[in-house]
Image: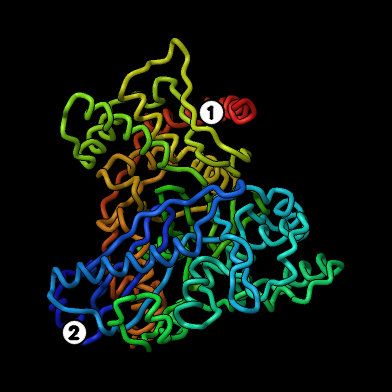
C-alpha cells in the first residue's frame, strides 16, 4: 500500500474516511481507511458460533451486539489516536462469512436461527440440486439450505418473504436495500457470468421442482438483487445509523457499496480479481479462489463455481476446517508454560512453534493430523472429530508434530486444488495468501507453497485482509473518477505494483507433502471410524 500522505484527523473531520466491516467466524472487525486506502483506525469484537439443535448458528442479538461493539471500539481507537469523533463518512461496506441461510417473514423477522456455512445437514438437498442443475451445489449454499428445509417439511418455508446471507442481512437493516454483491450472490444460487445475475435456467428449474408444494412465492421474489462492484447500493438510513453507532454521533446518508462475502473481500485485499490470479484465505476455515480464463470441462463435487465482486468466474475450494485445531494445540503449550510459571506471549509462542515445524521432515515423519472440528464436505465427512494419528515407528518429534498440524490446515485445500492444476490444467500467474495462518512470517506461506506446488505471495495485510478488502470496495464506489475496472483500480490506486513477498517450494518439500497427503487420504477411514464410534 502507498505511504500515508494525508493527516488522518483532517480526513475524519472532513467526512472523507471510509468504513469497512467484516463479520468473520471468530471476529467482527471494523477498519477505517483514508482517501488513499490506507488503514487509519480499527476496532474488533471476538465471538463464537453456537451449536443449537445440532445446527451451527449465531443469534441476531449476538450479531448486532458484536457489530455495535466493533464500531464502538473503532470510535475509541479514533478518539485515542486523533482526539476526534466520527460524525460522517464517505462510504461504508459490509462483508461477512458467505452462504448460509437467513429467511425472513413479511415483518422482517427471522423465521429460524441463522444457519451458517458450517452446517452439513443439507446433503440430500445439495445432491438432488446438483443433479437437477448439472452443476455442483455445495452443502453450505443458501439454495441447499432452502431445499433441505422443504424436504424436511419445515413449516416456516411457506412464510418466507426474503432470503439472504449475513452480509445481505446487515446491509438491508442499515440501508433498507435488499441487494447483494454478485460474489456473495453466487454463493446463494449459481450466477450467469454473462448477465451477472442468478442463472435464469436454474431459477426456473427450482420453481418447477417445488411447484407441487404450493408456496406463495417464486424463487426470484425472495432473493436479493445481484449487483456488481462499483454500483451504488443504497445509503445509511437514520435507523441504520442508530443501529450501528449507539452513541448517536454517526449521521445518516452515507453511501454503501454492495455487501460481499469474505471470499470476495479476500480477492480484493490480495489484488486477485484478474484472470490467472488466485488467493488462499486461511483462518478458522480456508478457501482458495482461482480466477479462471474459461469454464471447467465438467462439474466437480469438490469445486464451487462462484464469481469475483465484478462478476468473473472463479473456481473455489472451500474447507470447513483450518486453524481451529492448530490453535487448540498451541493453547496446550500455553498451559504447559503457565504450569512452569513462565510468562506467555502468544505471538512469541506461535512464532517459536511454527518455526520449529520447518525443522521437521518433509513428510512429517509419518505423523498424521485431522483438524476436523466440524464435517468436511470435500473429503466426504458429515461430522468431524479432531484426531492425531501415528504408528510406533513414526518419528514423533516436536518439529514433526507441528509440521503435521500445519500440513493438516491445508491438506483438504490441496486435495481440491490438485483437480484444478492436474486434471483441468488451470494455469495461474500468482497466488496470494492471507489470513491468520500467515501471521508468522514465512511458515504458513512455505507450507502452502509445498501443498500447491506453486510460489505463494503474502502481503503486509495478510493477517487482517477482509475488513480492509470491503473498505476498498466501498472506496471503489466513491473514489474512482476515471471509472476504471476493479482490477485496474486496484492496480493503479491501491497496490501500485506491489505483489508482496514470494516463497517458492523446493522439490523436496513438494515430494514430502505429496507423501503426506497420500497417507492422509488412506487415514480418512480412521477419521470416519472416530466419527462413528465417538
Name the quarter where the N terminus is drawn.
bottom left
Mark 2 or mark 1, which is nearer the start of the sequence?
Answer: 2
Q: Are marks 1 and 2 in contact (CB under 8 Å)?
A: no
Q: State which mark lies toward you, 1 or 2.
A: 2
Specify few, some or many for label 1: CA neighbours under 10 Å numbering under 14, 14-19, or 20 or more: few
The percent position of residue 67, horizontal first and vertical second, equals 38, 67
SS assignment at label 2: helix
* For residue 101, above or below residue 93: above
User: Toward the viewer: 188 or 154?
Assistant: 154
The image's mark for residue 339 is none
Q: Is residue 375 visible?
A: yes
SS assignment at label 1: helix
- Horizontal relation, residue 427 to residue 379: left or right: left
The residue shown at (52%, 46%) is 320
User: Toward the viewer: 162 or 493?
Assistant: 162
Residue labelled with disc 2: 13
User: Toward the viewer: 180 or 169?
Assistant: 169
The residue shown at (54%, 47%) is 51
The percent position of residue 166, horizontal first and vertical second, equals 51, 66
Residue labelled with disc 1: 518
The percent position of residue 285, horizontal first and vertical second, equals 46, 48
* For residue 342, above or below residue 167: above
Q: Is residue 270 visible?
A: no
Amino acid at each position: 500500500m502507498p505511504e500515508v500522505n494525508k493527516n488522518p484527523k483532517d480526513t475524519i473531520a472532513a467526512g472523507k474516511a471510509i468504513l469497512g466491516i467484516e463479520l468473520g467466524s471468530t471476529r467482527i472487525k471494523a477498519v477505517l481507511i483514508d482517501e488513499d486506502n490506507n488503514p487509519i483506525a480499527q476496532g474488533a469484537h471476538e465471538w463464537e458460533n453456537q451449536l443449537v439443535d445440532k445446527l451451527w448458528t449465531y443469534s441476531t442479538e449476538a450479531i448486532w451486539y458484536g457489530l455495535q461493539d466493533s464500531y464502538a471500539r473503532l470510535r475509541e481507537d479514533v478518539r485515542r489516536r486523533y482526539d476526534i469523533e466520527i460524525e460522517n463518512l464517505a462510504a461504508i461496506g459490509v462483508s461477512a462469512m458467505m452462504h448460509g441461510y437467513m429467511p425472513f417473514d413479511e415483518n422482517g423477522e427471522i423465521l429460524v436461527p441463522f444457519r451458517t456455512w458450517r452446517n452439513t445437514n443439507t446433503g440430500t438437498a445439495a445432491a438432488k440440486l446438483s443433479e437437477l442443475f448439472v452443476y455442483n451445489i455445495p452443502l453450505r449454499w443458501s439454495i441447499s439450505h432452502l431445499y433441505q428445509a422443504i424436504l424436511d417439511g419445515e413449516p416456516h418455508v411457506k412464510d418466507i418473504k426474503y432470503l439472504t446471507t449475513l452480509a445481505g442481512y446487515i446491509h438491508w437493516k442499515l440501508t433498507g436495500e435488499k441487494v447483494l454483491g454478485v460474489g456473495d450472490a453466487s454463493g446463494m444460487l449459481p450466477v450467469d457470468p454473462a448477465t451477472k445475475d442468478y442463472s435464469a435456467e436454474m431459477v426456473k428449474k427450482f420453481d418447477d421442482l417445488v411447484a407441487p408444494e404450493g408456496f406463495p412465492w417464486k424463487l426470484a421474489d425472495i432473493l436479493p438483487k445481484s449487483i456488481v462492484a462499483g454500483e451504488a447500493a443504497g445509503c445509511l438510513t437514520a435507523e441504520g445509523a442508530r443501529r450501528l453507532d449507539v452513541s448517536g454521533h454517526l449521521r445518516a446518508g452515507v453511501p454503501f457499496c454492495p455487501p460481499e462475502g469474505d471470499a470476495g473481500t479476500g480477492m480484493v485485499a490480495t489484488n486477485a480479481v484478474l484472470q490467472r490470479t488466485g488467493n488462499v484465505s486461511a483462518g478458522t476455515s480456508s478457501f482458495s479462489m482461482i480466477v479462471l480464463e474459461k469454464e471447467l470441462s465438467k462439474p466437480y463435487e469438490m469445486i464451487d463455481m462462484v464469481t469475483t465482486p465484478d462478476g468473473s468466474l472463479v473456481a473455489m475450494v472451500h474447507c470447513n476446517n483450518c486453524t481451529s485445531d492448530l490453535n487448540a494445540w498451541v493453547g496446550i503449550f500455553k498451559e504447559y508454560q503457565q504450569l512452569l510459571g513462565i510468562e506467555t506471549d502468544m505471538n512469541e509462542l506461535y512464532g517459536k512453534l511454527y518455526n520449529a515445524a520447518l525443522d521437521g521432515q518433509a513428510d512429517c515423519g509419518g505423523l498424521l493430523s485431522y483438524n476436523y472440528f466440524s464435517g468436511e464436505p470435500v473429503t466426504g465427512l458429515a461430522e468431524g472429530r479432531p484426531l492425531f494419528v501415528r504408528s510406533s515407528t513414526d518419528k514423533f518429534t516436536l518439529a514433526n508434530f507441528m509440521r503435521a498440524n500445519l500440513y493438516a490446515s491445508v491438506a483438504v485445500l490441496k486435495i481440491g486444488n490438485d483437480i484444478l492444476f492436474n486434471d483441468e490444467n488451470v494455469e495461474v500467474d500468482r497466488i496470494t495468501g492471507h489470513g491468520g495462518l500467515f501471521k508468522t512470517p514465512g511458515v504458513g506461506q512455505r507450507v502452502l507453497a509445498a501443498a500447491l506446488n506453486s510460489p505463494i505471495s503474502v502481503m503486509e495485510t495478510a493477517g487482517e485482509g477482509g475488513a480492509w478488502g470491503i473498505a476498498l470496495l466501498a472506496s471503489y464506489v466513491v473514489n474512482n473518477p476515471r471509472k476504471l475496472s476493479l482490477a485496474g483500480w486496484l492496480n493503479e490506486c491501491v497496490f501500485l505494483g506491489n505483489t508482496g513477498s514470494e516463497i517458492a517450494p523446493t522439490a523436496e518439500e513438494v515430494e514430502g507433502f505429496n507423501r503426506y497427503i497420500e497417507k492422509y487420504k488412506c487415514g480418512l477411514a480412521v477419521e470416519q471410524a472416530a466419527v462413528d464410534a465417538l
